[in-house]
Image (tube, grey):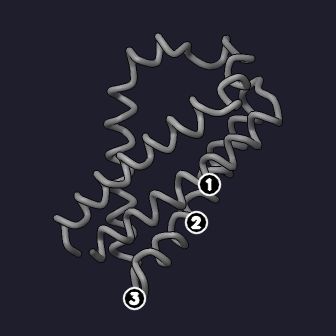
């Protein structure tokens, strides 16, 4: 394992994850779905207060995923292998986070489906970035 590449892959994936998150969650009609549940989701102003914790948590998560990717990689294109890896992580996130939240939180099916699609895209792209940088 190359620790420098793991760190760079984690940093790159974190940046892409937040850019896509901003585009997919804050700049699409999905933002209106979140607004339907003010008792469940923080306001944008409240999120700004805790955003540094979220940024550190995602960076740590990306470092873990980059290390997992490095341990699991068996050859092939970094882009293709990263996309497959990201799709697996996306599937895990949908089951363990998105649908889990639908069961536990008082949110609608439309928001759940939109989140599932957005997170799948985010994780596939993050996987591609991890694969591309790690094999760069």
Q: Which residue is mark 1?
A: 120
Residue positioned 50% across, 78% down in the render: 80
**Residue 98, x across and y down, in percent:** 67, 42
CA neighbours of label 2 inside 10 A, class few (<14), some (14 to 19), many (20+): some
For disc 1, the neighbor class at 10 Å (few under 14, some 14 to 19, many from 20) is: many
Q: Which label sits in the foreground, 1 or 2?
A: 1
Residue 68 picture location, percent across and down: 38, 67
The residue furthest bottom is 75
Question: Considering the image in quadrants, where does the N terminus appear?
Answer: bottom left
Nearer the N terminus, badge 1 or badge 2?
Answer: 2
> Where residue 46 sits in the image (x, y, percent)?
47, 12
Chain-order first, disc 2 or disc 3 = 3
Q: Is residue 54 left or right of residue 117?
A: left
Which residue is labeled 3 in the image?
75
Mark 1 or mark 3: which comes first in sequence? 3
Residue holding disc 2:
88
């Amino acid at each position: 394992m190359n620790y420098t590449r793991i760190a760079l892959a984690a940093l790159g994936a974190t940046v892409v994850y937040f850019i896509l998150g901003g585009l997919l969650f804050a700049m699409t009609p999905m933002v209106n779905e979140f607004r339907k549940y003010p008792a469940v989701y923080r306001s944008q102003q409240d999120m700004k207060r805790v955003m540094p914790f979220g940024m550190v948590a995602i960076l740590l998560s990306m470092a873990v995923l980059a290390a997992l990717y490095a341990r699991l990689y068996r050859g092939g294109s970094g882009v293709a292998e990263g996309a497959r890896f990201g799709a697996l992580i996306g599937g895990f996130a949908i089951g363990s986070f998105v649908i889990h939240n639908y069961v536990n939180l008082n949110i609608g099916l439309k928001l759940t489906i939109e989140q599932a699609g957005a997170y799948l895209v985010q994780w596939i792209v993050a996987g591609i970035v991890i694969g591309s940088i790690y094999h760069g």
